Image (tube, rainbow, N blue to C red):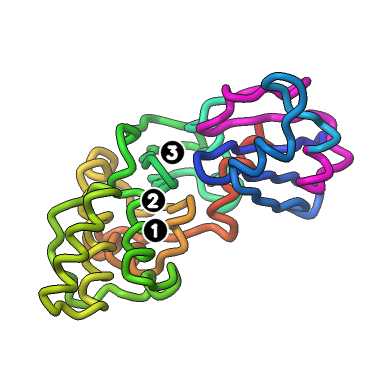
Amino acid sequence: MNATLGVDAGSRDVKFAMIGPDGVILKHTIDTVQFYIKCRGDNRRVDLKKLEAESGACGYERIVATGYGRNNVEIDNCSVIPEIMAHAKGAVYQTGLADFTLVDLGGQDTKVISVKNGTVDDFVMNDKCAAGSGRYLENIANTLGVSMDRLSECEDDPLVMSNTCAIFGESEVVGLVSDGEPLERILAGANRTVVMRLLPMLGKFRNDTIVTTGGVAKNRAIRAMMARETGARVIAPEAPQLNGAIGCCMS
């Protein structure tokens, strides 16, 4: 396998990966804004020396990029592939599975991909707003002053929350706190809101196995709720946030 540097330019973070004979040999993430500040060269081009210094990448023969910002910057000798393809390839590589439904829960969008025989069969996306995404959960956690780790442990007796908007959901949470609702129930309610928003998308692709990727894949409560609601086995690969970058390496 020729050494490939995979770059997933997400809305919140830019992820880098390289794969060697023994597996993934580079795992690196940088905030998207900082990436543009630190790695920018002339005009919209990325300075490869700055990129290598920032990511720790070396010894690669080609660069393949995907993600929200893949068309915002130009990298010399870089191939660009669709996000759906990158995430499917990454999940197949990381799990060793060939047939599953992939749920990628990113910072600002959600992708549900049907993978059959190791390739994309069909997909649906929600990219109109950040509702039901990582941004929504981050805003809720920040409003309540809790960590994402604590949020991920709350699944019991969830409150029904009507507002999934990443912005206006904060106002609903403030109202629930002022009404004296327990913090754990509010957090569980936020997790439930994400899962309920996913269900119509998941209903299009029935499969016994769901693979979750993206930052939200680390949320244990959401994985457990998703399993209960669908009856499927729900798993997260070892590096869910780097899945798109890993998929670029496999293209």
The quadrant of the rendering that contains the C terminus is top right
- Which of the two marks, 3 or 1, is nearer to us in this view? 1
In the image, 84 versus 215, the foreground residue is 215
In the image, 113 versus 14, the foreground residue is 14
Answer whether residue 113 is magenta in the image: no
* Image x and y of residue 231, in percent: 25, 60
Residue that label 1 marks: 138
The quadrant of the rendering that contains the N terminus is top right
* Image x and y of residue 87, in percent: 52, 39
Residue for point 20% across, 65% down:
174
Secondary structure under the numbered disc 3 in the rendered image? strand
**Could you tell me the amino acid type at mark 3?**
Val
**Could you tell me the amino acid type at mark 1?**
Glu
Horizontal arrangement in the rendering, residue 200 relative to residue 22 (left or right):
left
Horizontal arrangement in the rendering, residue 43 relative to residue 118 (left or right):
right
* Image x and y of residue 2, in percent: 82, 34
Answer whether residue 68 is magenta in the image: yes
The span from disc 2 to disc 3 (Cα, nearest Å) is 26 Å
Q: Residues within 10 Å of mark 3 (few under 14, many from 20)?
A: many
| Magenta-colored span | 51-80
- Using the rendered view, name the quadrant where residue 6 is placed: top right
- Image mark for residue 115: 3
Question: Looking at the image, do the residues carrying marks 1 and 2 touch, with CB atoms under 8 Å apart?
Answer: yes
- Which of the two marks, 2 or 3, is nearer to us in this view? 2
